[in-house]
Amino acid sequence: MRLGRERPEVGPGIVEMHPRWEGILRGESPLSAMQRVYRRFFLLFPAPWRCKFCNAPFKGPAAGTLRWIGYAPSAKNASICAR
Ligand SMILES: [Zn+2]
C-alpha cells in the first residue's frame, strides 16, 4: 500500500477510494498477489480463448472442469468469465 505517500486531491463530491481497494487495484496488496498466482496457474492450460481478466480457459481440455466452478463466458460479455 502507499503508506507515507501523499494522496492526490479528490474533486468535490468524489469519495476517496478505500486504501484496501486502492492496494488491490494497484497491485500493491497481498490480496492482488493471489490474483496474479491464479492468473499464472490458468496459463498452464492450453486454450485458444481465455477470460481477459483472469486467464481462465473457455475452450480446451480444462475448460469443462472450470466451467463447473463458474469460469464460463459471461452472457453479457463473452471476453470475461461469469464469476
Ligand atoms: Zn475471469
Image: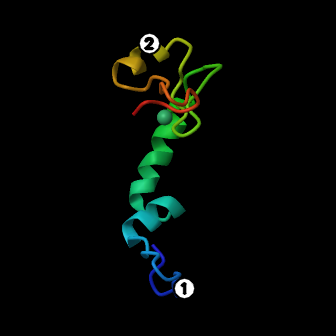
Q: x, y percentage for residue 59?
A: 56, 15
x, y percentage for residue 6? 52, 88
Quarter of the rendering containing residue 3:
bottom left
Please name the amino acid that badge 2 sits on.
Gly
User: To which residue does mark 2 refer?
Assistant: 64
Dividing the image into 4 quarters, which one contains the N terminus? bottom left
Specify few, some or many for label 2: CA neighbours under 10 Å numbering under 14, 14-19, or 20 or more.
some
Q: Is the residue marked by circle 1 packed among few (<14), some (14-19), or many (20+) residues within 10 Å?
A: few
Q: Nearer the viewer, mark 2 or mark 1?
A: 1
Rendered residue at 46%/67% (across/down): 22
Is 18 located above or below residue 78 in the figure?
A: below
Q: Are marks 2 and 1 in contact (CB under 8 Å)?
A: no
Amino acid at circle 1? Glu
Task: Give the mark count.
Answer: 2
Q: Nearer the viewer, residue 70 or 43?
A: 70
Element type where label 2 sits in the image: helix
Q: At 49% from the left edge and 83% from the top edge, which residue is drawn?
A: 12
Query: Which tag, 2 or 1, sits closer to the chain's start?
Result: 1
Q: Which residue is mark 1?
A: 9
Q: Residue furthest front?
A: 13
Q: Position of residue 50 (x, y in %)?
A: 58, 27
Q: Residue at x 46, y 39 (%)?
A: 38
Figure quadrant of residue 13: bottom left
Where the C terminus falls, by quadrant?
A: top left
30, 66: nearer the viewer: 66
